[in-house]
Amino acid sequence: MAKDLSRLKHTTVNIKDGGEVIIIDTGSVIDAEAEAMLQALHSRSTGGLRSHLKILAEKGADNFMEKFYIGYGHHSIGDCGDTTIFIEGVSMPAVKAVQDNPLFRGQESSTRYLDFSQQSFIDPTQSEEGNALLELQRQFYIDAHEPTREYLKKLHLRNEEEKISIYEKAIDARTFDITRSLLPAGASTNFAWHTDLRQAADKLLFLMHHPLSEVRNMASSIKEALHKHHPHSFGHEIPNETETYQNLIAENYYYHDPECSDEPVINFKNINHSELKKYDDLFKKRPPKTGLPKFVGQIGTLEIKYQLDFGSFRDIQRHRAITQRMPLLTTDLGFNQWYIDNLPKKVREKLPEHLNMIESTIGEMSISRELQQYFIPIGYNTSNKFTGDLPATVYMVEIRDSRFVHPTLQKVAHNIGEQITHHLGIRLNVDPEPNRFDIKRGEQDIIALDE
């Protein structure tokens, strides 16, 4: 008989000005703090796990975590206990702030699966002008959806052997791929963060000083929820100078280069070509869907600068093995041309006036560039920069140069791959037809078991 999971004592904290943080209680007999204690004892004693379980049963994990993890600062103990946090009703920039971490594990809601006719939009100014601008963008997005869908059905006719339900899902996926560009970054979304106790504390330290007040409020609520749910693992004392340093990081946080090239520019100067030759067989004989060994990374790193719309940045940011800057979303680099080219004529003709209205309204609002992001559609290009070793960069290219990847990101990945092959002679295992419309896209869905 299935357990009644609704009876579990989940921890919930509301976020100031909107949103919610939920930490789930999995019903485990041994929770995150207890598991961290067991692993710590196991590393310092030959008594074996059974003796540690006896200590846990008799004394609990409370005093142990407060003494050794918090009191003595044995940070590695916090690596051994995991927790899952669900954050709902926050903006895309807020989600990106948490995900801006090479150790992030979790999932973000896709723009394909949220009903933006109902989803709340975040207005950091809480003004009539700001709300009106967001609602105009919502309506333009809604009005563009069905014409785009019908246009795509005429452009990509269904073959008789193709299953109707899969074809319809593929058309829907491409429709959302196009129309998502019209959504403002302030459109709210949800995400889950699976993290260990140590990384949660470390990440929250900066988020509490983030340039966006929404992120600071969110971080404060996450910290409160974690302290309630894991009361013996979140009482770290933080030196004043460390807190002050976070403000300096915040001042330099966003990356923006208004002169950024519209095509990827790669710096190959840090690649050791003599070392590259030593591993010739590892590149030539590597089978498809097989990653390069990590030690190949010692050959050197690539620095890559490129333009990409903010919507697709949300996808490339998932690659944790490369070091990326957080781009500032502005209107400086224009609206990505792919979206314009793929909208139906009746929507495309209205788009310039719509975008001009957005830009002029934002310009009149007298708010910081950081806050302007909430009102800017995610189809606008951002300047981007990342540094990665060869295994990490090759992996990103091979995953993203595919017909199942959003075309604006696929184009960037393909260009980077071509340059790597040309300059380094490395063969890449990529999709031979990356630009082909494939209805298998309609099979890439996660559904409830009873659907």
Image: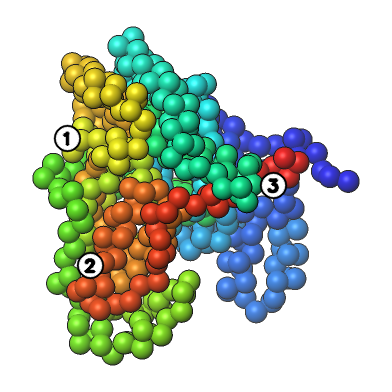
Kind of residue sitting beneath label 2 = Gln
Estimate how packed mark 1 is, as few (under 14), some (14 to 19) or many (20 or more) residues with alpha carbons within 10 Å. some
The residue that appears at 20% across and 80% down in the rendered structure is: 272
Please, is residue 262 above or below residue 268 in the view?
Answer: above
Residue at the spot of label 2 = 419
- Mark 2 or 1: in front is 2
Residue 276 lies, in percent from the top left, at: 25, 83
Give the Cα distance between marks 3 and 2.
Answer: 48 Å
* Disc number for residue 26: 3
Please, is residue 155 above or below residue 34 in the view?
Answer: above
As drawn, which residue projects farthest toward the left? 259
Quarter of the figure with residue 322: bottom left
Kind of residue sitting beneath label 1 = Asp
Give the Cα distance between marks 2 and 1.
Answer: 27 Å
Estimate how packed mark 3 is, as few (under 14), some (14 to 19) or many (20 or more) residues with alpha carbons within 10 Å. some
Please, is residue 268 above or below residue 413 in the view?
Answer: below
Q: CB of mark 3 within 8 Å of CB of mark 2? A: no
Q: In the image shown, does 5 or 305 lie closer to the viewer?
A: 305
Left/right of residue 40 with respect to residue 365 in the rendered view: right
Residue at the spot of label 1 = 332
If you read the primary sequence from the N terminus, does the residue marked by circle 3 or circle 2 appear first? 3
